[in-house]
Image (cartoon, rainbow, N blue to C red):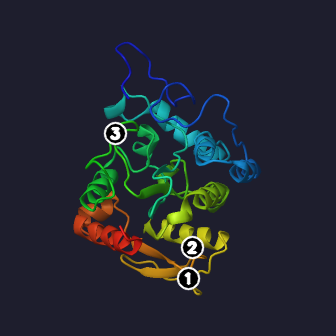
Amino acid sequence: MTAAAGEQPDSPVPPGTGWPDDPATAATPVAEDPAAVRRLAATAGTLAELTARQSVCRACPRLVEWRERVAHEKRRSFASERYWGRPIPGWGAERPRVLIVGLAPAAHGGNRTGRVFTGDRSGDVLYASLWRTGLAAQETSTMAGDGQRLLGARMVAAVRCAPPQNKPSVAERDACAPWLTAEFALVSGDLRAIVCLGHFAWQATWSLLAAAALEVPRPRPAFGHGAEALVPRRDGESLLVIGCYHPSQQNTFTGRVTGVMLDDVFRRARLHAGM
């Protein structure tokens, strides 16, 4: 979202001030510490209420300081743009068949655009694959409110704020976990496959499934591209967990992960999900 000529971009964006798809308002309760995260995540009665609360969280001082400093200082190429500068809530289908789990928003990607994996090269590669495999309505994702839709899929991050050097601490990961646990409980009724983008997401997913009292494998499977494990659901069906190398610039530039490799993972997820 670009500011009008002569206007000082208001970054980070205050809740309820007109940002496209902003789930929060000025009255949305704010978690100021990990205990409040646990309480507000557990008491959110609807998915809309939960995503609103996610989007205003201030429980981790280091992450709050970093995401807001980046949003204020900006990258030179985005100097005229408003930065979202807040936690990135989950988005996509409310009853997905496929859940896509990432690490955290990028400082000048999701932290700028208000949507995870959007506005950077990683997102360009990821959404192109989702579009080719029928999980996204458009080939690109540029900004919240751009018309993009996920089709039978939902995307979340294990940590909702952009961390310095893309490395959240263990304490920050644990503080954020209740948001993911609560979201999983609300959206998992039809879920049949989880795609984990990178080792961090893989580890977070097994903790998530254990917290949901599902029967996770012991020992937990090792991460790898295309690694698979089946987790029994309570309805007698199975949940397929698939590992996928993260579509970071380092991985895509070196060929460690390619568009074809991503397509194969998402087609496998769709197949198991019956899509």
Badge 3: how crowded within 10 Å, few (<14), some, or many (20+)?
A: few
Q: Which amino acid does label 2 sit on?
A: Trp
Check the image and report above or below for 259 versus 111.
Answer: below
Residue 147, disc? 3
Q: Which amino acid does label 1 sit on?
A: Arg
Q: Position of residue 221 (x, y in %)?
A: 50, 83
Q: How far apart are marks 2 and 3 (CA)?
A: 32 Å
Label 3 residue SS: loop
Mark 1 or mark 3, earlier in chain: 3
Q: Distance between the residues labelled 1 and 3?
A: 38 Å
Q: Nearer the viewer, mark 1 or mark 3?
A: 3
Which is nearer the eye, 6 or 240?
240
- Circles 1 and 2, Cβ within 8 Å, touching? The answer is yes
Q: Where is residue 274 in the image (x, y as percent from the top left)?
A: 38, 71
Mark 1 or mark 2, earlier in chain: 2
Label 1 residue SS: loop
Residue lying furthest bottom: 219
Q: What residue type is labelled 3?
A: Gly
Q: How many labels does the image show?
A: 3
* Residue 257 in sight from this viewpoint: no
Check the image and report above or below for 57 versus 156.
Answer: above
74 vs 147, left or right, is right
Residue 81, disc? none
Which residue position is annotated with label 2? 206
* Residue 68 in sight from this viewpoint: yes
Which residue position is annotated with label 1? 220
Q: Where is residue 53 in the image (x, y as percent from the top left)?
A: 63, 42
246 vs 15, left or right, is left
Q: Position of residue 65 (x, y in %)?
A: 59, 40
